Image (cartoon, rainbow, N blue to C red):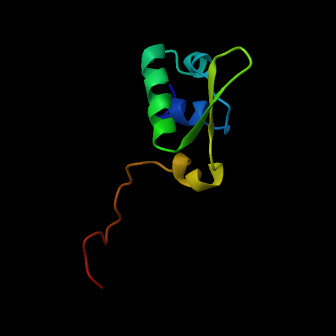
């Protein structure tokens, strides 16, 4: 069983271009509609560039992948023993 969040990290390892179909293959537990909505929202937020491919299907790619170096960092970290203490 993969670690929590690993399927997301694995699906987004490359900078793209991604399509709804390509991500749906990598994330089979998520509905295509949810993937499409997430890609559109990320494009509207300026994280992804939206382009129309030769087949007419939207393709998404990171605008500046180097900005997203923290994508592979766990969101929740367990604080160390000195958390909240002032030195």
Who is closer to the viewer here, 53 or 31? 53
Question: Furthest-right residue in view?
Answer: 54
Side of 32 relative to 55 (left or right): left
Q: Residue at x 47, y 38 (%)?
A: 44
Who is closer to the viewer here, 8 or 32? 32
Position of residue 45 measured from the top left corner of the image (x, y, whole percent): 46, 43
Q: Residue at x 71, y 14 (%)?
A: 55
Q: Residue at x 67, y 34 (%)?
A: 16
Position of residue 7 measured from the top left corner of the image (x, y, whole percent): 53, 29
Q: Residue at x 74, y 18 (%)?
A: 54
Position of residue 75 measured from the top left corner of the image (x, y, whole percent): 41, 48
Side of 21 relative to 74 (left or right): right
Side of 78 relative to 28 (left or right): left
Question: Furthest-bottom residue in view?
Answer: 87
- Residue 3 visible within the image: yes
Name above or below for residue 8 compared with residue 73.
Answer: above
Name above or below for residue 57 compared with residue 4.
Answer: above
Position of residue 47 measured from the top left corner of the image (x, y, whole percent): 53, 44
- Residue 31 visible within the image: no
Name above or below for residue 18 compared with residue 77.
Answer: above
Quadrant the C terminus occupies: bottom left
Who is closer to the viewer here, 70 or 62? 62
Name above or below for residue 10 compared with residue 58.
Answer: below
């Amino acid at each position: 069983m993969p670690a929590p969040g690993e399927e997301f990290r694995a699906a987004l390892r490359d900078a793209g271009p991604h399509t709804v179909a390509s991500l749906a293959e990598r994330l089979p537990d998520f509905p295509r509609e949810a993937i499409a909505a997430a890609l559109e929202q990320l494009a509207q937020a300026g994280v992804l560039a939206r382009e129309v491919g030769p087949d007419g299907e939207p393709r998404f790619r990171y605008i500046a992948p180097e900005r997203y170096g923290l994508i592979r960092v766990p969101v929740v970290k367990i604080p160390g023993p000195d958390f909240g203490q002032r030195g």
